Amino acid sequence: MNFQLNEDQQLIEQSARDFAQEFLNPIIARLDQTGEFPKEVVKELADHDFLGLHLPADVGGANAGWVSYVAVIESLSRSCAAVASIMNNHAMASYAISYWGSAAQRNRYVPALIKGDLIGALAICEHGPAPGIGPDALVATKTEGGYVLKGTKAYVRNAGVAGVYVVSAVTDAHDPNALTAFIVDSNVAAIKVGEPITTMGLHGCPVADLVFDNATVPEAAILGTVKGAGEIVRRTLALASLGEAAQTVGIGQAGVEHAAAYAKERVQFGQPIGKFQAVQALLAESATDCHLARLGLRYAAQLAEDGQPFEAEAAMVKSFLARLGSKILVDTCQVEGGMGYSEAMPLPRMFRDIAGTTLLDAPADFPEQLIAASIA
Amino acid sequence: MPKCLVCYKWTLDEKDIKIKPEDLSLDVTRAKGKISDFDRNAIEEATLLVEHQGGAVDALTYGTTAVKQSLKDVLSRGPGRVYWIGDNSAAKADAYVTANVLAAAIQKLGTYDLILCGEGSSDSFNQQTAPRLAALLGLPCVSFVLKLSVEGGTVKATRGLGDCTEVATVKGPVVLSVLGQINHPRIPSLKQVLGANKKPKQEIKIGDLGLAADKLQPRAVPKFERGFVTKRKNIIFKEANAAANVAKLEAGLATEGLQ
């Protein structure tokens, strides 16, 4: 068993780090302060083939595999997790269309998604306890030649900037668990993007509700089969969780490196604070958590790449990071003391961002259910 | 359409090198390799030239057996083919040995219109490879180039010479060293990285170059390598008023030759 990235993966990771240094580092502060969507950077991601890296060659992707995917997301997140978050959500929409879409759907959307001419978004979550359940669940009613969608999708990342959404909706009133997936263009009449939700972190990655007020879509908008959204949602969200875990690891690693550099420079009581055992313990534990999370993450990504079941392993990483992601940033902030708490330093931004990567999509107890089911 | 050859060095990434506090020796056990920074500029310049005018770019490198790790990286940056000489003599090679090996390999490969090098390597930064290569190959050398154009068989190069620039025009095959300011090396796209797998890589055995043994004996032998650590002086001025403290600071800086 080889724990190293292979040569291609190492070069791809290096490209992503170089990309982050050149294109993300200069905009981090602006993005964090203004929350502007970084359209020009998304286009650069496309020009460097990052938006198609996870897609097969027959649809125009680079076919680089899921291990490369998580290495890229981690590398981008070391600089700017908001951009990685935009890319992750976009990538999941393009993956769903590429994997379950008809030839016509693939031809229509995937090339534009790879080129960054079209932004994609997954719209799965709802305000109820689960998609399809709750008073404002998205319901698709069959009409002649199509469906009428009514309801609300919640916390949609890339909302408002996306040109196409992959959504799940109830198509059988007697069976709310049997959802159907649709590809919905943003310009369909009667779809409204809600007020932008101001988030704690990941500024620049827009989040809003998506309100469908009797929006009509053709039957050709169905992704996969009627009532077939279960598999699409399960697999896509599991892959998305790999990307989210990669964001957490990237932010955590950046925090550890920043704090370690600070500990070398900051002199207190006649020596750099990194010489003190208490500071060493904080750094050592944080570095260990990042390292172990990365190993688990890449293992899960390798399973996905090999076409093997990976959902439980992805959930284990997610669960591990749900507990330890924020702790890494608490500890690295602690190393920097009062300075680390200051907004003049990058750790507060990282602290807010890492919370977004562990909280926004899957609540902390969700992975445990999946893991328990896999071992029961 | 120019036929270009870029010579590059596979060096250790300096950001991964640690200095051992006990004796200031260098710990390179976790240092990864990289294409020397200024050589990336040379690769980029040749690639840009060929993208605009047609022609071809090959790459050539001499290093220890670890140099094999560089091949996909260099091919992802534009060159269509790479030749590599992997031999452990490179571990102690100085500019004299490096130029001898590269020149012998170039003579074996045939004629190139432009042979490009970086101004110096990221590690030793001797700045000797290009001029030595030119001397060994009997070609003109234009060093420290910050702007380059080729028309017909004529090379027009602007040299950056610190306080002034100089424009040199040269006919025909020429060896050039380029400055970091000449361009901004590209970040290879994923398809360029993965496409590098399909490009040809050819090994040249050092024994096939017909070099006499003394050509592989370095003339410059480093006695030791030590990291440089800036020591804090820990001087604190504690005069009662700020003006006196500033005056003392000013005097202290002057003593250190910093004013």
Image (cartoon, coloured by chain):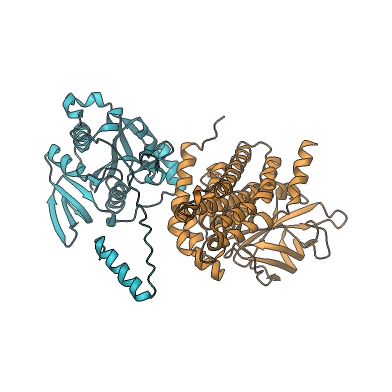
Report whether residue A120 is seen: yes
State the residue lying farthest toward the front: B240
Of the pair A168 and B181, the residue shown nearer to us: B181
Query: Which image quadrant: the C terminus of chain B?
Result: bottom left
Report whether residue A101 is seen: no
The answer to whether A39 is drawn above or below residue A284 in the figure is: below
Tell me, what hue is chain A? orange
- Residue A356 appears at what percent x and percent y? 64, 59
- Residue B177 appears at what percent x and percent y? 21, 48
Residue found 17% across the figure and 29% down from its top:
B215
Say how many tags the image has: 0
Residue found 60% across the figure and 53% down from its top:
A331
The answer to whether A312 is drawn above or below residue A30 in the figure is: above
- Residue B181 appears at what percent x and percent y? 28, 57
Tell me, what hue is chain B? cyan
Q: Is residue B231 left or right of residue A207?
A: left
Snapshot quadrant of residue B56: top left
The answer to whether B208 is drawn above or below residue B5 in the figure is: above
Snapshot quadrant of residue A368: top right
- Residue A268 appears at what percent x and percent y? 49, 56
The answer to whether A359 is drawn above or below residue A199 in the figure is: above
Of the pair B4 and A80, the residue shown nearer to us: A80
Q: Is residue A374 left or right of residue A6?
A: right
Residue found 66% across the figure and 54% down from its top:
A358
Of the pair A61 and A72, the residue shown nearer to us: A72
